[in-house]
Image: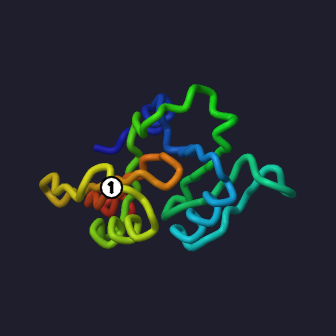
Amino acid sequence: MEPTTDEREKRMLRGLVTVSYFADDLTAARRWYTDLLGIAPYFASPADGPPAYLEWRVGDHEDELGIIDRRYAPHQAPAAPGGAVVFWHVDDVQVALDRLLAMGAAEHEPLTRRGEGFITASVVDPFGNILGVMYNPHYLEILAR
C-alpha cells in the first residue's frame, strides 16, 4: 500500500543527498573518479587552483558524490577504512568489481550472492574510502515505476 502524502512528509529520512569521501590528493581523486564515472565533476571549490572539494552527479537519480580534502574532515581520519558502506547499484557486480580492482582499488568484501537476486561487493579506493557495488532487483523495480 502506497503511503499518503502526509505520511511521506513526516518521514525522517527523505532520500540520499550526498555521499562524502575524503582524499589527501584531490587532483588524483578527481582523475580516478572521473575515469571511473566517465564524467568530470560538475562543481569544484575553489573554482581556480587546487580543489578542496569536488562534486559529481551520479546515476539514475543524480545522487551527489563529494570528495573532500581530508584536511577538512570533521573528525580524525581512521588508520583503516571503516564505518558505513554505501552501495551503488550496478547492472553487473562482477564487471564493476573487476574494473575497480583494475583501476587500483583493493578488495574490501568479495562478490557475495545474498539470495533472491541480491549481489554485493566492496572495495577500498586508492584514497582509503569504502565503495560498495550492488545488484539490487528492488532498485530496478522502483526505477521502473
Residue at position x 37%, y 52% in the image? 132
Quarter-of-image position of residue 20: top right
Position of the N terminus by quadrant = top left
Is 42 situated above or below 71?
below
Residue at position x 67%, y 53% in the image? 26
Residue 111, percent from left and from top: 23, 59
Quarter-of-image position of residue 22: top right
Other residues around mark 1 within 10 Å, as few (<14) / some (14–19) / many (≥20): some
Is 50 situated above or below 7?
below
Q: Nearer the viewer, residue 109 or 8?
A: 109
Q: How is the image coloured?
A: rainbow
Residue 63, percent from left and from top: 54, 54
Residue 91, percent from left and from top: 33, 70
In the orientation shown, which residue stands out farthest toward the left? 115
Residue at position x 36%, y 65% in the image? 90
Residue 6, percent from left and from top: 47, 32
The residue labelled by disc 1 is 107
In the orientation shown, which residue stands out farthest toward the front? 79
Q: Would you say 105 lies left or right of 97 here? A: right
Q: Would you say 26 lies left or right of 35 here? A: right
Quarter-of-image position of residue 144: bottom left
Residue 35 seen from this side: yes
Residue at position x 51%, y 68% in the image? 36
Q: Nearer the viewer, residue 5 or 105?
A: 105
Position of the C terminus by quadrant = bottom left
Dot 1: element: strand
In the orientation shown, which residue stands out farthest toward the right? 48
Give the amino acid type for the residue marked by disc 1 in the picture: Glu
Q: Nearer the viewer, residue 42 or 12?
A: 42
